[in-house]
Image: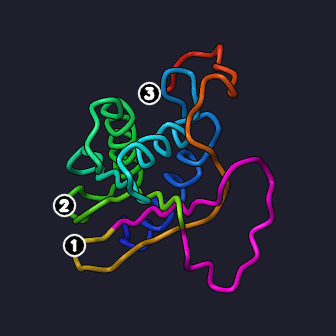
Amino acid sequence: MARRKELKNIASGLYGSFISRNNDIGGYWGIGKLCLLAQQSETRKVLLDLLARSVAPESADFSKLVNGYYLFLQKQLATRGIPGEWVHSAIIELDFAPDDLNGKHIPITTWGNLFKLTVAITDDMKKNHTVYGYSYCEPHNPRKESKSAGAERF
């Protein structure tokens, strides 16, 4: 029997997949490309609305990525027998200048600047199922990065 509390597990799965280095766009890390979008748009946040299949700030370059994660969400709902009507919203938010570290020290594990990734699924009863974490990245720069030789994920 499906339960709304399983939406937190789905949010966690989306988070893990999205932050992964396997999340690539054209052979480069998707988060680095989204960081470049934020920089070019002079904003600190990028929002991916999975149900609307949109990105803010707007960019057609990420439609394949958003559609891929929309399908990921739909597959996870179907696998757990959760009706799509239970999901009111599904947002992936990247904040490239987070200021709410909640007193945490985030160790530097790679090069770049700190960012916060949040995946929030709101159900039809207005309950939030949210997962977040921090990591580091730089805006996409093909001169500094190696392009993946594997098949493009999205």
Residue 62 drawn in magenta: no
Judge from the rendering whether residue 78 lies leftward or rightward of residue 8; answer left or right. left
- Name the residue located 41 percent from the left edge and 42 percent from the top edge: 37
Numbered disc 3: secondary structure: loop
Numbered disc 2: secondary structure: helix
**Sequence-wise, which precedes: disc 3 or disc 2?**
2
Magenta stretch, residue numbers: 98-121
Q: Residue under circle 2? A: 85
Q: Is residue 65 above or below residue 80?
A: above
State which mark lies toward you, 3 or 2.
3
Disc 2 and disc 1 in contact, CB within 8 angstroms: yes
**Sequence-wise, which precedes: disc 2 or disc 1?**
2
Which class describes the residues within 10 Å of circle 3: few (<14), some (14-19), or many (20+)?
some
Q: Is residue 36 above or below residue 64?
A: below
Q: CA distance from mark 3 to mark 1?
A: 29 Å
Q: Is residue 115 above or below residue 141?
A: below
Q: Residue under circle 3? A: 154
- Name the residue located 46 percent from the left edge and 43 percent from the top edge: 34
Amino acid carrying mark 1 in the image: Asp
Judge from the rendering whether residue 1 lies leftward or rightward of residue 107; answer left or right. left
